[in-house]
Image (cartoon, rainbow, N blue to C red):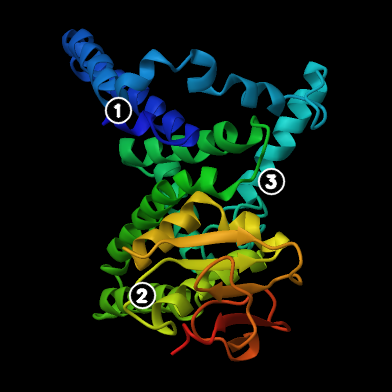
Amino acid sequence: MFGFFSGFHFSSRIVVLLAAVLMCGWVLKKHARKLPIVICALIVGFFIGFGPRILETTPEIFFKTSTLQKGFSSNEKGDKASLQSAMYRVGDRYVKTIGQFNIRSVDGGHYPRHEPMFPAPFFVFVCFGALITLFGRKKNSTGRTLLLFLLVIPLTHSAITDSPYLEHRLSSLLTPLAMMAGIGMAKCFIYLEKSRFKNAQWIFSAIVLFYAVFVCFGFFAQKSAQYNRKDELYLAMHTMHILKFNVKTPLEKDVCLRVSKDVFDEFDKKHVQEMFEFYMNPVAVVVKEDTQLPKKTVNVLESCSDTITEYVSYVIHCSQESLFACPDRQKNYEIRVIKSLAK
């Protein structure tokens, strides 16, 4: 698993390396004689999990040294900075990244909705769990390990990199945050056992469970994951829906999408092409750019050489949207299907 996870994004590699170091430290403390065996096992696991890519992966690529070097630069061009200014820059980024836990919204730009990583009620339990871990009478090695992750990951995944505050890098924090919140909730449950109210524990548990369900339901009901700034991707999703449900089937030949210039780049991306291939198999969806079309235009034709004269227009009213979340609720979008294909 050590090697397997090393093949993922650079942010996961740091977490895995840190976990390996902590594991070696624990073995050294408890079973010092077994440390060489554990190190050998980690090395073998790395080579097996990472696979043949290790032959073509340089240390610069594996550790993203160029990314880290740019993180210490004084500007986006990568110019060298003095140690003092570099440390100040890293410190400022680190504090802001810590604030993304709940104080300030995430604005890394990878996702369109900028919100704190953890809801405020749950973050209270995170803070309580951290205080218990640090100042509690009993030593909690698991809690202290989680605290270490919570303090190190903002540094390695954001503050010292060339692109700070990116949400997909900081997603590694969600697991230790949730576990730390669990420690805080467990302590509250134990303390409530001494309360005069007999049902205090169950009332507390019911409130926490209700809020967790409420947050999850709100996430799916509001479809916040589907918000996207790009009109092009929004059109691609609706085009796929129209091809699947509003075009005559079974199709005997390929379908052509003639799209405007501003839309073509998104439709031509690999993941969009694979989406068409998966849902329309065995019919192939050919995407062609038409510089004569107005912006945000998608025409569905039987052949790319056809001229669309008679067509059925599918207007997407953002104010009445039910399938996907509109990038701009003030807009309406239109997808035109040649009449011979429309149901």
* Image side of residue 214 versus residue 161, left or right: left
The residue located at (31%, 69%) in the rendering is 192
Label whose residue precedes the other's in the sequence (1 or 2) = 1
The amino acid on which the numbered mark 1 sits, given as a three-letter code, is: Phe
Q: Which mark, residue 205? A: none
Q: Which residue is mark 3?
A: 96
CB under 8 Å between discs 3 and 1 = no
Q: Secondary structure at mark 3?
A: helix
Write the residue at 39% across / 49% down. 175
The residue under the point 47% across, 53% down is 271
Which residue is identified by label 2? 251
Q: Secondary structure at mark 1?
A: helix
Asked whether, in this view, residue 152 is left or right of residue 188, the answer is right
Q: Nearer the viewer, mark 2 or mark 3?
A: 2
Please tell me which residue lies in front, 111 or 39. 111
Measured along the vertical axis of the image, is residue 330 above or below residue 305?
below
Residue 245 lies in quadrant: bottom left
Q: Amino acid at mark 2?
A: Leu
* CA–CA distance in space, label 2 to label 3: 54 Å
Residues under numbered marks 2 and 3 in contact, where contact means CB atoms less than 8 Å apart: no
Q: Earlier in the sequence, mark 3 or mark 1?
A: 1
Q: Is residue 92 above or below residue 173?
A: above
* Residue 331 location, quadrant: bottom right
In percent of width and height, residue 338 lies at 55, 82
Determine which of the numbered discs, if any, sits on residue 2 in the image: 1
Q: Residues within 10 Å of mark 1 (few under 14, many from 20)?
A: many
The C terminus, quarter of image: bottom left
